[in-house]
Image: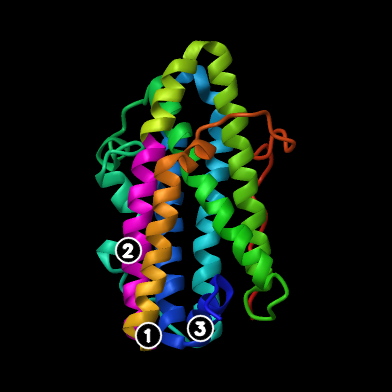
Amino acid sequence: MLSAKSVFQEILANDESFALFCSIAASGESQGGWENARIAALVPDSERELAPKITRHGADEDKHGRIFNALMKRRGLAPVPVPPETDYTMLLEKNGIGLAHEQLGRDERITVQDIVTYLSHSRVTEQRASEQMELLRKHFADDPDIGRAVKQISHDEDNHLAYCHEELLRFAYAGHGREIQRTLRACALAEIRIYRDVSLAVMAHMGRILGWSRAKSAVLAAGIHAMYAYERLGGWRRMVSLKMPERRDALGGPASAAPEFA
């Protein structure tokens, strides 16, 4: 039976597909770590109290990148080049979602509006990350090879999502509500399209590595297109709602250490 679990089991069981999966994930996390570190360094004086939380967010992302690299090292594998069409983070940036890397590379303070843009982008992408890790946790939390990593990253992504909700609500109460909703909607509609394209590209690469039949590849592609249709027709709205999270001040402390994979 073809299921999300069976597909992931195939990918994780093969060294070449596992290395590609981890390399894609590690690259995205490392890019996210750099972005958050730069944003933390450039926040306006009026939002300096937010800087430690942004720093913590970036530290978590860096940690996740190290975890994925450690998982490869544990199996005697080295990172592989990430195909550009599978680079979710860079494709978001190239499509104008979030703050441009060119802007973050300059030593100029960003504005409160930039912070709102950053948080709105993060609220959308952390929704995706939280859902992806929840799926992996559901099926692989007890896996002896990746279980600890999955649980750690899933916990962190839930914290990141809670932080985005709480901080965006703070800015909404301060008068930025309409701007937040406009930005969230634009980010969500762009993200679902990019996520579809990246998913199709990743599955195409995995299919070649694992020797999937045309029929199997077609079924998986149809599933990705069906998910996009659902999101385009209204599923994207889950990415733009805001509510006060149960986890308050989720990024109020230092980042936790990465688990060891000796």
Q: Secondary structure at mark 2?
A: helix
Q: Residues within 10 Å of mark 2 (few under 14, many from 20)?
A: many
Q: Amino acid at mark 1?
A: Trp
Q: Which label is found at residue 212?
A: 1
Mark 3 to mark 1: distance in Å? Answer: 10 Å
Q: Earlier in the sequence, mark 3 or mark 2?
A: 3
Q: Is residue 11 left or right of residue 243?
A: left
Q: Which residues fall within the magenta stretch?
A: 187-210
Residue, x 29% and y 42% (percent of image)? 101
Q: Amino acid at mark 2?
A: Thr
Q: Residues within 10 Å of mark 3 (few under 14, many from 20)?
A: few
Q: Amino acid at mark 3?
A: Glu
Residue denoted by label 2? 86
Q: Is residue 37 above or below residue 241?
A: below
Quadrant where the C terminus sits is bottom right
Q: Is residue 244 above or below residue 57?
A: above
Q: Is residue 151 above or below residue 251?
A: below
Residue denoted by label 3? 10
Q: Secondary structure at mark 1?
A: loop
Q: Residues within 10 Å of mark 1 (few under 14, many from 20)?
A: some
Q: Which label is found at residue 228?
A: none
Residue that extends furthest to the top in the rendered view of this protein? 175
Check if mark 3's residue and mark 1's residue have beta carbons within 8 Å.
no
Q: Is residue 217 left or right of residue 61?
A: left
